[in-house]
Image (cartoon, coloured by chain):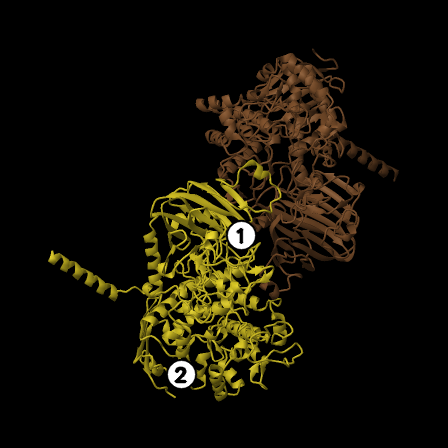
Chain colours: A yellow, B brown
Amino acid sequence: MLKLILIISLLISVSDSTFAQQRKLVDYVNPLIGTAKMGHTFPGATVPFGAVQLSPDTDTIPYAVDGKYNGDVYKYCAGYQYNDPTIVGFSHTHFSGTGHSDLGDILVMPTQGKLQLNTGTAERPEEGYRSRYRHEMEVAKPNFYQVLLDDHNIKAELTTSTRVGLHRYTFPKSTESHIVIDLTSGIYNYDGKNVWTVLKVHNDSLITGYRQTNGWARTRTVYFAIRTSKPFKNYGSGQFDGNQVYRGFWRKFDQRNNFPDLAGHNLKLHLDFDTEEQESILMKVSLSPVSMTNAVANMEAEIPNWNFDQVVAEGQSAWENELKKIEVDMLSEEDMVNFYTSMYHASLMPTIYMDVNGEYKGLDQEVHQADGFINYTSFSLWDTFRAFHPLLNLINPSRNADMVSSMLAHYDQSVLKMLPIWSHYANDNWCMSGYHSVSVVVDAILKGVYKGDANAALQACVQTANTRRYEGIGAYIDLGYVPDDVSGTSVSNTLEYAYDDWCIAQLAKKLGNETLYQDFSKRAESWKNLYDSSIGFMRPKNSKGEFRPKFDVLETHNQGFIEGNTWNYSLYVPHQPVEMMNTMGGARKLESYLDSLFTMHLPDKYFEHTEDITREGIIGNYVHGNEPSHHVAYLYNITNSPWKTQEKVRTIINNQYHNGEAGLGGNDDCGQMSAWYIFSSLGFYPVAPGDDTYWIGSPLVKSATINLENGKQIQVNARNQSVANKYVRKVSWNGKEIKDFKLSYALLQNGGSLEFEMSSKPKR
Amino acid sequence: MLKLILIISLLISVSDSTFAQQRKLVDYVNPLIGTAKMGHTFPGATVPFGAVQLSPDTDTIPYAVDGKYNGDVYKYCAGYQYNDPTIVGFSHTHFSGTGHSDLGDILVMPTQGKLQLNTGTAERPEEGYRSRYRHEMEVAKPNFYQVLLDDHNIKAELTTSTRVGLHRYTFPKSTESHIVIDLTSGIYNYDGKNVWTVLKVHNDSLITGYRQTNGWARTRTVYFAIRTSKPFKNYGSGQFDGNQVYRGFWRKFDQRNNFPDLAGHNLKLHLDFDTEEQESILMKVSLSPVSMTNAVANMEAEIPNWNFDQVVAEGQSAWENELKKIEVDMLSEEDMVNFYTSMYHASLMPTIYMDVNGEYKGLDQEVHQADGFINYTSFSLWDTFRAFHPLLNLINPSRNADMVSSMLAHYDQSVLKMLPIWSHYANDNWCMSGYHSVSVVVDAILKGVYKGDANAALQACVQTANTRRYEGIGAYIDLGYVPDDVSGTSVSNTLEYAYDDWCIAQLAKKLGNETLYQDFSKRAESWKNLYDSSIGFMRPKNSKGEFRPKFDVLETHNQGFIEGNTWNYSLYVPHQPVEMMNTMGGARKLESYLDSLFTMHLPDKYFEHTEDITREGIIGNYVHGNEPSHHVAYLYNITNSPWKTQEKVRTIINNQYHNGEAGLGGNDDCGQMSAWYIFSSLGFYPVAPGDDTYWIGSPLVKSATINLENGKQIQVNARNQSVANKYVRKVSWNGKEIKDFKLSYALLQNGGSLEFEMSSKPKR
């Protein structure tokens, strides 16, 4: 007996030790990071770039009340706020880290006891179907979410495949167990957002339908299919559209109970069950952009059985493969968590928007067959062109090539003949400024990632950049800048257009189109037209060529910029940083400017009315929570003080990324904040996508292996790495010292060794 | 010179005489018949069973005002009322002869002068885009409509192919010529009926879009493409949806002028042109049930060029072929007009609902590929099962077979598992009573017209008839009748279910399913359960088996019947007329009942509040304007007084069908009224579809050739035919006298000669 126990304990310890050695990367991911305050991430279950994001919504407050914007809704961009006391239900679509929102489709909630079809309130959840919950009874892992719904005594577990959400609800014994399906619920909802909803109950365990909305996406339809593991004994719809004028239909049937053919503006459905103590009912919910038929096919293809644990495991295995693209060793557990949660957050969006049969809905609202690519949607390009897409070019090039194909398909389907600005679900919501899809397209072509028709892609970029009707482009072409009297964000528009135009010039050059190269190279210098040397900042200028007389260099609002003041935005010339520096008076002038930026005090009044900037998101007057400054810390490399870049990068990492629900200093912005972290942790950053140069910073990793898709590896090694040793004494590529602190994609993609020697002392 | 003139005048007279000899049948059609008062026909252009009915709408008043039904809307079921002084525009979809409505999609109006996007009023058309017109400047022919729009001095001409409307507008010289496209307009419209609308302007002459509505059809979307022969110089949308909350989109673009990508609840678009004096601008508008892409493909396939006259000619040639299926010689020009206008009206609906590539939208709101049939929609089955579909079985069997296939596809797509009741545009509007699609399906199978899977069809019929949830069917199955306390139309429901059940029994018998045969034969006798021998009428009975105590045998409303009083409805046992007669007390009793029905005075109060019955639509208490009595005149054949059938048939024809705008005594009901006329004019009528027997009446034709699809011909000859000679002295089939006044489909379909000898004296 003793012997047996010994063997068992040996086995246990062996297995423990093996586990420790083989600790999975998914175990480092904490999906709760960013779920409090401004991160706008969601804690629920999804697979990499999955079409379904099955996640709890803790409130679904209206976007507008009495026609006026309700500022509180901003908190709910991802549906979940960590400090909320109740869960309304689990819906199937969520953006990650956005600063505006939509989605939250097909909200499902298991309940028990008296049937209630309204949501109830956070204060009095018992008056509706929502429930209290406690974080100690909550588990959030990649592709797995679990919570106990206290009001109903139901354990809810969620997992997904790419296009299917799988729910497992464990009920108490009851003759009044329900699952509520609420098609009226949504994120950034408002009365009238639902354009139309349909529900068809095919039998006692299969439902199909769709939800058509008019929100941030103007015309968006999500088709779905729902299958339960146990037949419902009864079902019904408590709520009908009150707008129907012809009511002949109603007289013929009782539509409230067990009526299988429902349609209206605002539908809800309840499924009723008898349950035994601890009985689990599973439910699959599959989505399709195209049709209910496709939704059923997606379900059958991806989750043909009812093996919940297997679906969790398959999704986590997919996550492991995604995370493994960069294997790191870091100084602390917290760093490991931050790194792999960043990897996780940088692998959520854009999402796959295509059925298993290759069909998807295009921008033209028509059904298309994807021709040799996977179609993606939800491109938050103002954010993601900076580091997210460049990261994909490095570790996920085939996926990024498909994203470029998706953008070019969008262009082909655009009656405006424009590449996407901020596109989601067969729409463009036109959010933010610039036409940064050209940066993504150009960078992917120049890096050899996108292998399609480059001339057609160039044409799409040029056409987009020449859309005179869009946000001052016409005046920009004519005058060399967007005039203050034409656009409220004339300066940031001009700066971003100029960068994008430089990208187009690079592609034109590569393709030998000299005319376009000259034309767009000239446009790329437009930033010069708004630099006011009398004050040393970019400044709005009217159509007559006069700078705006009254101008506040600290203020973010109404000064000619979008999400940034001129202190931050004046540095936005990523494509011509040296020319910018010279224009600003040279290296010393720029260095002192940067020093001031990172150290000056920005009074509260300059950001307290800006919904996505808080004290946490800024360092001095440097705003990391918004993207225009993401390259700024690296600019010390051209002022001949790389050590300051190294210091600032470490400062930003320490300051802005934490393991905790409030661990992000601002919106994660669809992975851009995370991609900045990943690059910077590895010790380099793509200052100007379209150029194949990375600028060296200060690595946070002790070591890293970047496993490239072509089978090659990049080894990153930081000798003498420590919290204090944040300065780079020496950096080498394959043994050859890098003196200019620059690395190229061309070198990296062939694999090799990037060797840092770290030190606590700056190398001045 | 004299010689030349002589030759010319000879030529003219020759050509005149040739024309007279070769007078085309289309020239007898007067599409204006039924456009005044209750006919509810439309005068516009269409081809046989065409998907496009391009016709003027003279008003588009709302279905409901302040949530209350607006009775005046009833006049506008087909969009046009002959006595109206103005035309609002030309829309592309119209029902013919219905008593409830929908459609009126994509209203187009050419205007000149100041741009106006509101409709204006009939009294003050100059305050909007509508226009006065005069009938003397109006021409309505098969597939051609022309009118002068007085307010704009624009000649409008319309023609169509199956899926495309072709407009030709001849403008005066103007720099302010416009074409308004109003997606907010519709028939039986109301605020909120438009669920969503989309408009995409692809270039200066191509527009696509769709209109999604919630009306009589709950969820209906019409996709379209529009191409102009001349590029518009400018375009714009005057009206936006005011419900959009997220307005980021608006800030980016000027959406009112030349903005090509529009969507909202209520869109309008104006196209602007410079025109020379008498300049014609043509416009194609194609429709699709599936997509904008398909609409473009339909247009390119059907009308690739701009040859207006050719499109008119092709459509008229299609009409000529349709009309030629029965070639008649009649006593008067008016009879010829009535006959061929009836043929015309009986060839408008159901309409083709399928793209040139075979795709259509199914009842399940999904896109389907028609598998070996042409898909049709708009089945007004309570009307059309009686004579319209039987007429198709005789002269258009392959079309009727496709209609049966369409109904069975509808069944397959039905989550309720029911054949259509009153279906249109991928919906069932559930109008009227019974499940008469089973009559159409059974009749087509038993006559050998539908050659598909008869057992599957039987299954669909049985499943439909066993839908317990629908209009008292459950109680009907349990009790043998629909109880008065379950349905407000319990008696008519019971009588119609009994007939339909008899049809099912006949099919079951044919297929050797003895159980179903017995079961449904028993159900077919359910009419007996509601016959109250104490009063000699059918009468509502409650669940306890008690007849309703207070009962008005003349009243139509709230007495247990739909669109008929018990005087008319008590005779509705078409499948068992002899048993009915015996139950009612025998031949003499029935004859006296019929005599009374046709001669008694029905006071105004019994129909003045019934919207579709007027004094014109009744003879005594016999209501021809509604369908339940359509077989009644033929019942004298079993009271041994066929001469009374002959007399009544002639009376009804003379009384109810005239060449004139108000020429129809009631709604044409999608061709049922016309089909009654056609059969009766030929001298026989299908009293009980499902039985292959026709009952002999009194022919109106002098002679007729029925050209069967199988190449055979039926010659009908009425010797001594005259207005006075309305009695049949003798009738023979292929020389053999028909003594029982019955003919069979089995005989007719082999071709042959039906010989009548007419007389002014009844043969008693």
- Name the quarter where the N terminus of chain B is drawn: top right
Whether residue B744 appears in this view of the structure is no
* Residue A121, x across and y down, in percent: 49, 56
Q: Quadrant of residue A49?
A: bottom left
Label 1 marks a residue whose chain is A
Q: Is residue B389 left or right of residue A571?
A: right
Circle 1 residues within 10 Å: few <14, some 14–19, many ≥20: many
Give the residue at x 67% y 35%: B97
- Residue that carries the numbered disc 2 in the rendered image: A740
Callout 1 amino acid: Gln
Badges 2 and 1, same chain: yes
Residue B47 showing in the rendered view: yes
Residue annotated with mark 1: A212
Q: Are marks 2 and 1 in contact (CB under 8 Å)?
A: no
Please provide percent x and percent y for residue A176.
Answer: 41, 44
Q: Indicate which disc, 2 or 1, sits on the residue closer to the N terminus.
A: 1
The spot of residue A536 in percent (x, y) is: 56, 85
Residue situated in front as seen by the camera: B183 or B763: B183
